[in-house]
Amino acid sequence: MKAYELMLILNPTLDDEAREAVLEKVRGVITADGGVVDSEDPWGKRHLAYEIRGFADGDYFVVMFHATTAAIAELDRVMHITDPVVRFMILRRDDLD
């Protein structure tokens, strides 16, 4: 398995329960194929450089994990169809392998 970093920007109006549900969905997709979540870092609400889907702010999260290529493809698919996700980016971390 290879090391990855996921940067999530969530809808800033989500309550704690809805935010945790999205993060639990992310954890589930990563661990379903044998992956491991190494760390989660909530950055909190920050002002965006420009509005995205009408939001001027976003709730940022960074998730470091190890996963297979199939899990990355599934995570990408799930993030695209999850409404509270405003933006996301998955990066391969060669320095952490």
Image (spheres, rainbow, N blue to C red):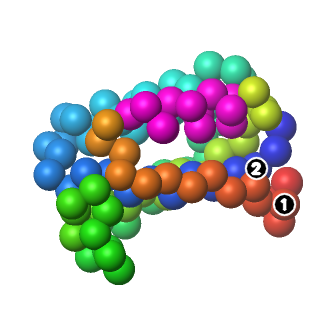
- Residue 72 rendering spot, x and y as whole percentages: 68, 36
Badge 1 is on which residue? 94
Task: Locate the N terminus and report the quarter of the image it occupies.
Answer: top right
Residue at mark 2 to residue at mark 1: CA–CA distance: 7 Å
Q: Residue at x 63, y 52 (%)?
A: 90
Tell me whether the residue at label 2 lies in contact with that at label 1, contact meaning CB atoms closer than 8 angstroms.
Answer: yes
- Residue 7 rendering spot, x and y as whole percentages: 51, 57
* Majority secondary structure of magenta residues: helix
Label 2 vs 1, first from the N-terminus: 2
Residue 29 sits above or below residue 84 on the image = above
Magenta region includes residue 49: no
Say which mark, if any, is on residue 6.
none
The boundaries of the magenta stretch are 71-82
Q: Residue at x 48, y 38 (%)?
A: 79
Q: Residue at x 22, y 62 (%)?
A: 55
Badge 2 is on which residue? 3
